[in-house]
Amino acid sequence: MYQFTYAEVVEDSPQEMRARERDALDRAVELLRRADEAGVRSAEAQDALVYTHRLWTIFLDDLSSNGNDLPEALRAQLISIGIWTIKEIERLRIGAAESFADLIEINAIIRDGLL
């Protein structure tokens, strides 16, 4: 089976790609809000954490790719945010954190920056 980079697969305009990324982050924020209401041990929490982890894994893979055209400084900042996000997800999974508020806020900020 062939493997392609994100840039090779997505042939849409930059605006369309950003809209898709924004939609994906919007979904993450919505799932995280539901999880926050239902509690950290709920099925909603597990769904939100799995989805957000997968999303940021995809983002991190793309951000670390040589084919990524974002400025290096911005890429580094987004990679830092992604690493923090993955760590915060793990803290919630193991019970070291109880609130989704920081994840909601950060993902909403990144989403809103994609306008």
Image: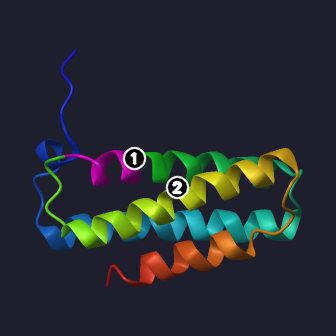
Nearest the eye: 52 or 73: 73
Residue 63: within the magenta?
yes
Rendered location of residue 51, percent (x, y): 58, 49
Residue 62: within the magenta?
yes
| Left or right: where 38 falls relative to 53 | right
- For the magenta stretch, what is the residue range? 59-65
Nearest the eye: 84 or 48: 84
The quadrant the N terminus occupies is top left
For the residues labelled 2 and 1, the Cα–Cα distance comes to: 12 Å
Q: Are marks 2 and 1 in contact (CB under 8 Å)?
A: no
Residue 101 position by quadrant = bottom right
Amino acid residing under circle 1 = Ile
Q: Residue at x 54, y 72 (%)?
A: 107
The mark found on residue 58 in the picture is: 1
Above or below residue 6? Residue 44 is below
Q: Circle 1 — which element?
A: helix
Of marks 2 and 1, which one's residue comes earlier in the chain?
Answer: 1
Rendered location of residue 6, percent (x, y): 22, 45
The prevailing secondary structure element of the residues shown in magenta is: helix
